[in-house]
Image (cartoon, rainbow, N blue to C red):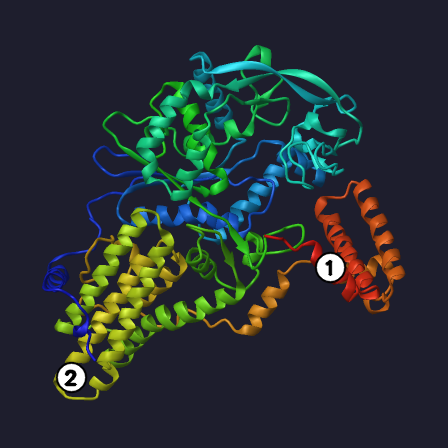
Amino acid sequence: MSLTTVEVDEFELLNAKNSWISKSCLKDINRVECQPVLPVKGEKNVLVTSALPYVNNVPHLGNIIGCVLSADVFARYCRLRGWNTLYISGTDEYGTATETKALEEKLTPQQICDKYFKIHSEIYTWFNISFDHFGRTTSPKQTEIVQEIFKEVHNNGYTTTASMEQLLCENCDRFLADRFVEGTCPLCKYEDARGDQCDGCGHLINATELLNPRCKVCQKTPVVRSSQQLFLNLPKVEAKLNDWVDKSGDDWSYNAKVITKSWLKDGLKERCITRDLKWGIPVPLEDFKSKVFYVWFDAPIGYMSMSAAYTPEWRKWWQPEDDTKITYYQFMAKDNVPFHSVMFPVCLFSTEQNYTMVNHIMATEYLNYEDGKFSKSRGIGVFGNDAQDTGLPADVFRFYLLFVRPESQDSSFSWADLATKNNSELLNNLGNFCNRALSFLEKFFDCVIPEIKLGNDELTLLALVTRDLKEYLSMLDKAKLRDGLRLILSISRHGNQYMQLQKPWVLIKGSNEEKIRAGTVIGLSCNLVCLLAVMLQPYMPQTVNIIGKQLNIDISSFLLNNFVSVFLPPGHKIGKPAPLFEKIDPSVINQLKSRFAGKQKSPEKELAMASGLDLKQITTVEQMEEAISKQGDTVRQLKQSGAQKSEWEPYVKALLEMKKSLEQMKLATNPISIEDLEEEISKQVIVI
């Protein structure tokens, strides 16, 4: 069998030959890369942001792939293409979620932000996220720019005022935000509904609709009071927004387009932008000086304030001169789409200033964990600070998260699948090709690249690789990161097949001509190893550094183009080859799967705990009814104690399971007779 049997046309072969001989992938040595990164007239300037992770918790793997990791891969790719690229992100720190967390941990909101900002920063550093700047929305720059933008919006007539009824806790002397009030759901009578949503029936509700409302802090009953609030007049900008979405939406991910269109379908309504809180950015109006901005209004402006913290010339990115073009990409999970496709653009339009508008909204679906959801309180799933304690390299996590990136539908993180992909794709495919080529060069050519004489098989290989390379560029230009990774693995498969067919280990033992032929096979293969390292830079930066040392070359000295040329010329001496990846054994996977499976007890264990009996001892209806009564008392006591939902929810589930078991026991004790069954069936017969 020969590679020449693969269908490659003459033009592809000629193009592959000319590119190999005459073109170069080296960067322009005369180009100076300046800091800070600023847009340059006449060049491709790319601004990349990822949705600001909320600071009140530890991000899990789904959070990481949904925003910062996806944006990181794309930003690295843009730099690899030689484009002028700035990647900005940071933590979203205002809002009631921070205040709630502060109450739970008995810290101030600022202390909570400081604590979790450090945690976030350390996690993203371990994952090798290449921010140009990672900032915070509690910075002085954020206050300055948010108030500046608000004044522009307000002075242009895009705000209105209206009175809203809110719950006031007279004991705490504060209006209660949604998360600070609980009560009975007016729809399903669930007793622990929140002020924004009922976990019992799932319906959205208003805090003032709750029956028997209570302050979450002091448990006192609040009173209804009116409060004047500021609203953003979305209908006034609706026509302009619709026109903008029609023109730019084609470059968004499919789900971003669908979500935005659904928001616009029924028309926009005015939206409140202020709250009666203390933790937030003060409203710069005398009549509203006791209020702060709603977090949804100020958070997206964080992209600007973080740019301003990066460079005093930040306006060159956000208010560019007319002849300087900025291409703006935003990465997020789908739940953040409306704030970036509707709210933030309306805000910028309302300033009537020349602010940079997003060109590409790239939204993922959700990443689940095994067969369920991530839950920090229940210990289910891998969170950012857990990943580094698993013993697996950050690049393995990066690889797998990008391999299963939920681009068009929800996907799942699976330990068994991670091991399979690591062992098959990284170890046996990519790693195997790299190590075979470099080890052979070390053993038979003293680590020196030999002369490479291109024959039909070599040109066919280069043509096939060029096809995949061009497709890789096409996919990453569209931020289809998962497909780009698969094309890298396709190229390494071509390389493995080429070496297997050419058998250089046989050629090296043959005639002088065959030894020269072996040199061509290995020299070309080593060059493909270098190409793979260049393409792999956005995905696995630590692995690329290792390959670069083994190749004895700076991988970052190359640009990625749509052709394959010489990376390692004859005479280049490589370093010491070594395996790039390690096999993950099933025993390791079983340990990790067990470790992150969660701390919750099974319904059977909960049942035994509630009844004081071993499961096997509950054999009668009376025993089960007694156990259910005790379990019900336990649930009520937990709820009345103010315990978090995560603490009492497993007990509720156990109670429901016990009730199911009771019904089954009753049925087994009093089985339905044949006569009763026939009578029941006869009632359901439909006469036609």
Question: In this orientation, does residue 1 appear?
Answer: yes
Residue 634, given in percent of the width and then of the height, sits at 83, 49
**Residue drawn where x is 75% and y is 36% of the image:** 189
Splitting the image into 4 quarters, where does residue 40 fall?
A: top left
Residue 70 image position (x, y, % from top left)? 42, 48
Q: Residue at x 47, y 34 (%)?
A: 338
Under mark 1, the amino acid is Lys
Pair 1/2: label in front: 1
Looking at the image, residue 457 lies above or below residue 514 = above
The residue carrying pointer 2 sits among few (fewer than 14), some (14 to 19) or many (20 or more) residues within 10 Å by Cα, namely some
Q: Residue at x 24, y 74 (%)?
A: 498
Q: Determine whether, in the image, residue 350 is placed left or right of residue 183.
A: left
Q: What residue would you read off at disc 1? A: 601
User: In front: 303, or 678?
Assistant: 678
Quadrant showing the N terminus: bottom left
Q: Is residue 219 above or below residue 641?
A: above
Q: Residue at x 21, y 68 (%)?
A: 572
Residue 316, position in %: x, y?
A: 32, 29
In this rendering, does residue 305 appear at all? no
- In this view, the residue in front, 595 or 560, is 595
Dot 2 falls on a residue whose secondary structure is helix
- Name the disc covering residue 514, or none: 2
Q: Secondary structure at mark 1?
A: loop
